[in-house]
Image (cartoon, rainbow, N blue to C red):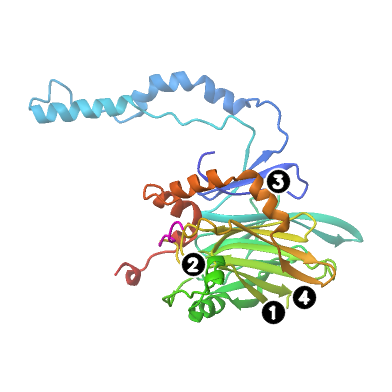
Amino acid sequence: MPKRPCAIALDPNEKTILCGDKFGDVYAFPLFGGSYKENSIDQNVGDETEQSKDKASSTSFISSANARTVHTKKNKQALRNQQNTIKKVPIKKTLDFDHQLLLGHVSLLTDFLCIGIRFEDCNVSRERQYIITADRDEHIRVSRGMPQAHIIEGYCLGHTEFVSKLCVLPWNKKLLVSGGGDDYLFFWDWISGVMIHKFDLKDMVQKLRNEGRVQNPGEIANDQSTTNIEPQDKIAVSGLWAICEPSVGRHSGKVLAICEGVPAIFWLSVSQNGDVTHFDTTRTGCNVISIAISEDQRSIAYSLDFVHEPFTTTKRANYPSTVDSPRIGAFQYSITHGNWQQTTERFGKQLGAYETAESREGNDRKVGSKDSAHVIDGLLYGFENLRKRTLKDSS
């Protein structure tokens, strides 16, 4: 890839891979592609590669100075450095696989979705595809699907900070949820570009912090409380997921949201018409990294960060007290009770099959080292770095 990928998705037909990179571009690749065949443009580029090496000196900057006109030792060294730089002209390499550039953003692209919507046109049902993209400059853009992705249908404007995550509700694909560096989760009718609801997520996070007592699995057994946690002015949404309500079919469901450095999962109930209410807040004890939903929509697994202390993305947890902390938690929908219940039975055995006590202790030792601290912070927490710094932040 020309730049580092940041998001990937399949088109509604599940025949094409869409990939967005940090440069702001979205590319399309065939899911089952054959051997790469150079087109006429690529062939010409390949034939001219050797010629470009010979022509590099003529197309590059040519200094008027030479050994006869330069006499001092310092100027002669500067001339040699300049000539060596001219000889090392980098040749841009083309992508050697089937690809198509669909669209681009001027700003850094953060997330995108590929959605198919059915419309009734003259009593004929047709599906139209759209690509919804988000960037660092608070924009949510709605473009047409392939092969007209260069045509912009509209925007969803209202964010004042970066947009990090997008989620379309499966029970109503015309509803879009977005989150990022703002205090709110935004709910949109993305086809018309109208915001229909805002949910104050920062207030929920602040309530957790103000409680001043977060129980993790080790603290529950010892009945110990943590120290009061200093308030945090800003939040960064790191994940949004939608899951249908099994008891009512595909007419309503839940939206799950997590934030960087927050040991909780926020559950929102969203109806078919877009009515949003707070359903529950699950305290996890450790910061939540990501969530995965099973194909049958009845099981949820979430991964936990046992390296950092709760409500922080920089302070390390106390070793070896976190060795026995869980890495994965799970929910399972109970048909008998008609609600979601926490469980470890289904995922606990699978986790134990891949990780023994010896390897776990060795991994903890590596993770706890100072050499890997900066690397781990960058892997787990990167959305807050998208926030634009102001003069107040610099001071």
**Residue at image mark 2:** 310
Q: Which amino acid, by three-letter code, is at mark 4?
A: Asn
- The residue located at (62%, 31%) in the rendering is 97
Across and down, in percent, residue 251 comes to 82, 70
Crowdedness near tag 4: few (<14), some (14–19) or many (≥20) residues, C-alpha within 10 Å? few
Q: How far separated are the C-alphas under marks 4 and 1?
A: 12 Å
> Is 112 situated above or below 184?
above
Q: Which mark is residue 273?
A: 4
Q: Position of residue 322 (x, y in %)?
A: 49, 59
Residue under label 1, please give it.
Answer: 277
The image shows residue 53 at horizontal and vertical percentages of 40, 21
* Front: mark 2 or 1: 2
Is 169 within the magenta?
no
Q: Gap in Å between the C-alphas at discs 2 and 1?
A: 26 Å
Q: Nearer the viewer, residue 227 or 105?
A: 227
Q: Which residues are magenta?
A: 315-320
Total marks placed: 4
Instruction: Name which of mark 2 and mark 3 comes first in the sequence.
Output: 3
Q: Earlier in the sequence, mark 2 or mark 4?
A: 4
From the viewer's perspective, is the residue at label 4 or at label 1 nearer?
1
Classify mark 4: helix, strand or loop. Answer: loop
Which secondary structure, mark 1? strand
Which residue appears at 44% of the width and 55% of the height?
A: 377
Distance from disc 2 to disc 4, alpha carbons, whole Å, reads 36 Å
Would you name the residue on which mark 3 appears? 147
